[in-house]
Image (cartoon, rainbow, N blue to C red):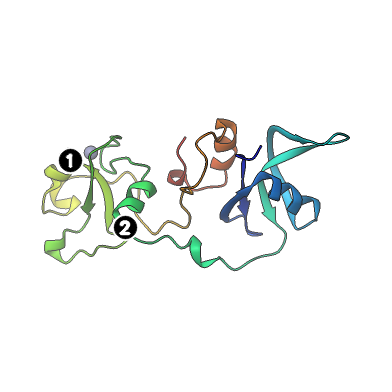
Amino acid sequence: MEHLRTLVLNSTFEPLQFTSSKRALILSMLGKAEPLEFDGFYIRTPTKSFRLPTVIKLNRFIKRPFRSYVSFSKKNVLRRDNHTCQYCGHRGPELTIDHVIPRSQNGGSTWDNVVTACRKCNLKKGNRTKEESGMKLVSRPGRPKFLFHSSLPDQTPASHLKSWAKYMPRVYIKL
Ligand SMILES: [Zn+2]
């Protein structure tokens, strides 16, 4: 049970962070949060058993903690884009970072101008804009609000991932 995590949503349904499922259960029992999703995991005491929530929603709005702002880095761009080329959808290693508006045309290294691209697409696009090269983005880049938590245990059940996906924007979770 120690490895189970629960997704915590703000009162506005915005994802905030992961917490241990035990803590999520306690928050629910104390009336501080409302459990929204379950997927069949229980915690058992000698006399009782409790369903472990996979998603809880806080009853009070909390200001976004500082740590949930995602810093701009190549690694985080790759994670935001789910390690998928944003031009052709290719997934895999050896992905590069592409400036949508090229640096030579004053395109900045910012969340809304940098995307994951495979080598082939990056080469094809070269120093041109996507219009100049006739290429299309599969999604519009932007600052992610929330990223897959790097400390999430590997043994996280698939059913958990599935129940989280509903509440999290497309790319921030590996399915
Ligand atoms: Zn590609």
Label 2 CB, ligand 1: below 8 Å? no
Residue 33 position (above or below residue 171): below
In the picture of the structure, the residue carrying the numbered disc 1 is 119
Residue 6 position within the rendered picture, expressed as x and y whole percent measured from the top left: 63, 45
| Position of the N terminus by quadrant | top right
- Residue, x 71% and y 64% (percent of image)? 60
Q: Is 49 on the left or on the right of 108, as rendered?
A: right
Residue 168 position within the rendered picture, expressed as x and y whole percent measured from the top left: 52, 47
Residue sticking out furthest to the right: 47
Which quarter of the rendered image does ligand 1 occupy?
Answer: top left
What's the distance in space between the residues labelled 1 and 2, CA to CA? Answer: 19 Å
**Which element is circle 1 on?**
helix
- Residue, x 18% and y 51% (percent of image)? 131
- Residue, x 69% and y 50% (percent of image)? 23
**Would you call the spot at circle 2 few (<14 residues within 10 Å), some (14-19), or many (20 or more)?**
few
| Amino acid type of the residue tagged 2 in the rendering | Ser
Residue 35 position (above or below residue 104): above
Q: How many marks?
A: 2
Q: Quadrant of residue 36?
A: top right
Label 1 CB, ligand 1: below 8 Å? yes
Residue 92 position within the rendered picture, expressed as x and y whole percent measured from the top left: 29, 34
Q: Please name whichever residue, 140 or 172, is drawn nearer the observer in this view of the structure.
A: 172
Q: Please name whichever residue, 154 or 163, is drawn nearer the observer in this view of the structure.
A: 154
Residue 169 position (above or below residue 12): above
- Residue, x 29% and y 53% (percent of image)? 74
Asked if the residues shown at circle 1 and circle 2 are in contact, with their CB atoms under 8 angstroms apart, the answer is: no
Residue 145 position within the rendered picture, expressed as x and y whole percent measured from the top left: 47, 58
Q: Please name whichever residue, 71 or 49, is drawn nearer the observer in this view of the structure.
A: 49
1 or 2: mark nearer the eye: 2
In the picture of the structure, the residue carrying the numbered disc 2 is 73
